[in-house]
Each structure stands twice: as structure tokens, then as C-alpha cells.
């Protein structure tokens, strides 16, 4: 679960998935996108630098292609934006107290990842590394993990009610782990975002402010927005969590 075999060994590529001229949603937008986008993967198969040897004080960022940063330059993906923000001096609730956290944020995004797979990945993370902080950006609720594969939906278990039941199962399971977990979710993951916000008070429901090169995933403005919300959650954990970070 902590490796993506399909990406292992790929050193660099100019496109990935729907982030190419053939499959993007708007070919003109793709052509005129002003920033350079390339994909490089570490030895674990994730779009990230090699992980440090000491993993005792890192932030684990788990998600799907929105976490991979499909269509974005690597440095504008939300885990990278968050890492820069956690490396700055952040003022606590006491204005005279200044803290520099400087935490490394590891990108565990996988294209097409289902919430079932994310839950399994987080459980494996906990068992292997006893992480202090995990941030999950949940995916489309219709996705499932079937026979070890991520699928767009399960035709035998498909519908709004079934999607909510499956999401709730994974959400509750992760919250039972004795560690800090921050929950967010990609834009338009579920047709009733208001219901999600009402049912899951601590869930960051991401508003999409812009589009990446493929004209589907979000770009830097949204990365900035969601990481600001994540930093607020982290600062709250600093003050209130029984699991020190």
C-alpha cells in the first residue's frame, strides 16, 4: 500500500492521465496554460522527492489525483504549498509566542484512488510509522476498491445512500486511530456538499477557485485556500490534541 508500482521507475514525464492534449477537458486551455508541468516520481512511486530516512516528524498527505497535483507544477501541489507554510514562522493564539515547525509534507497521492484504498493506506501508515499527523483529502464517494483495484463505482453497491454509508465507514475507522488526522475532501466529491458539511463538522469541504492544465483538477489558488484551512486545523491541534505534534 505504501508503493504505487505503476509509477515506480518512471523518472520524468511531460504528461499524466487526463493531463495531456488528447484527454484534457479543454484543449485550448491546455495549450495556453502558462506554467511548465512535468511529473517525477520517487522510488516509492509517488510524485514527490525521496522521503527522508527519519520519518518520525513528517506530515503524511494521503489522497487521489488532486493530491498528486495532476495538471499542476509539482511545487504548487497542496502538499508542497503546505510544507512551505509549515516552514514559516506561524503565530499561535498567544501573539508573543512564535514557532517554526518546518515539517516535511510527504505526498501519498494516487491517481484514481478510492476512499477504501486511502483508509487501508492510512492504517498501514499507522502500523509502520506511528505518524503524528496525517492529512487525508478524500475522493469521490462513488469510488470503491474491488478485488484490490480502484474502480469508478461498484455497480453492485451504487447510489447516494450507499456512497454515504461507505464513506462513513472509512471516516469513522480512521478517527478511531490514536493519532491526529485532518480530513478534507476534493471539490464535487458528492452531489450534496451541504449534507457533508452538516454531518462531518471537522471536514474541510474544498471550494474550487481555479483549474489546472487539464481543466479538471484545481490549481494554485485552490491549493492556497485549502492549505490555509489545514494550517488552522494544525494550529488548533497544537493547542488541544492529546497526541502531541
Image: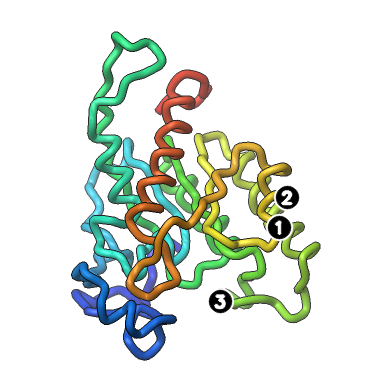
Q: Which residue is mark 1?
A: 192
* Residue at position x 64%, y 39% in the image: 176
As measured in the structure, the alpha-carbon distance from the residue carrying label 2 to the one carrying label 1 is 5 Å
Looking at the image, is 64 positioned above or below residue 181? Answer: below
Residue 145 point in image, percent of width and height:
61, 71
Residues under numbered marks 1 and 3 in contact, where contact means CB atoms less than 8 Å apart? no
Q: Is residue 109 visible?
A: no
Location of residue 97 in the rendering, given as x and y in whole percent from the top left corner: 30, 12
User: Which of marks 2 and 3 precedes in the sequence?
Assistant: 3
Asked which quadrant contains residue 143, the reply is: bottom right
Say which residue appears at 35% left-offset and 85% top-offset: 27
Element under disc 2: helix
**In this view, the mark in front (3 or 2):** 2
In this view, 81 is above or below 230: below
Q: Residue at x 35, y 67 (%)?
A: 212
| Residue that badge 3 annotates | 149
- Of the residues under marks 1 and 3, which one precedes in the sequence? 3
Kindly indicate the quadrant of the structure image that contains residue 50. bottom left
Q: Which residue is mark 2?
A: 195
Q: Is there CB contact under 8 Å for labels 3 and 2?
A: no
| CA gap, disc 3 and disc 2 | 28 Å
Q: Disc 1 and disc 3: Cα gap in Å? A: 26 Å
Asked whether the residues under the numbered discs 2 and 1 touch, taking CB atoms below 8 Å apart as contact, a structural biologist would say: yes
The local secondary structure at tag 3 comes to strand
Amino acid at each position: 500500500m505504501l508503493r504505487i508500482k505503476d509509477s515506480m521507475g518512471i523518472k520524468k514525464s511531460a504528461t499524466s492521465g487526463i493531463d495531456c492534449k488528447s484527454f484534457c477537458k479543454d484543449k485550448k486551455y491546455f495549450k495556453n496554460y502558462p506554467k511548465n508541468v512535468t511529473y517525477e516520481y520517487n522510488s516509492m512511486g509517488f510524485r514527490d522527492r525521496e522521503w527522508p530516512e527519519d520519518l518520525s516528524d513528517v506530515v503524511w498527505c494521503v489522497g487521489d489525483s488532486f493530491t498528486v497535483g495532476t495538471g499542476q507544477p509539482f511545487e504548487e501541489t497542496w502538499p508542497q504549498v503546505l510544507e512551505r507554510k509549515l516552514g514559516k514562522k506561524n503565530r499561535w493564539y498567544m501573539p508573543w509566542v512564535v514557532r517554526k515547525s518546518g515539517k516535511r509534507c510527504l505526498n501519498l497521492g494516487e491517481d484514481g484512488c478510492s476512499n477504501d484504498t486511502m483508509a487501508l493506506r492510512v492504517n498501514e501508515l499507522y502500523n509502520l510509522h506511528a505518524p503524528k499527523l496525517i492529512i487525508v483529502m478524500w475522493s469521490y464517494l462513488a469510488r470503491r476498491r474491488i478485488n484490490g483495484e480502484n474502480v469508478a463505482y461498484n455497480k453492485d453497491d451504487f447510489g447516494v445512500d450507499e456512497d454515504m454509508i461507505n464513506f462513513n465507514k472509512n471516516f469513522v475507522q480512521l478517527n478511531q486511530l490514536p493519532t491526529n488526522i485532518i480530513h478534507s475532501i476534493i471539490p464535487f466529491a458528492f452531489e450534496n456538499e451541504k449534507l457533508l458539511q452538516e454531518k462531518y463538522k471537522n471536514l474541510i469541504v474544498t471550494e474550487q477557485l481555479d483549474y489546472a492544465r487539464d481543466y479538471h483538477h484545481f490549481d494554485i489558488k485552490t491549493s492556497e485556500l485549502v492549505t490555509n484551512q489545514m494550517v488552522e486545523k494544525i494550529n488548533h491541534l497544537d493547542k488541544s490534541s492529546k497526541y502531541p505534534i
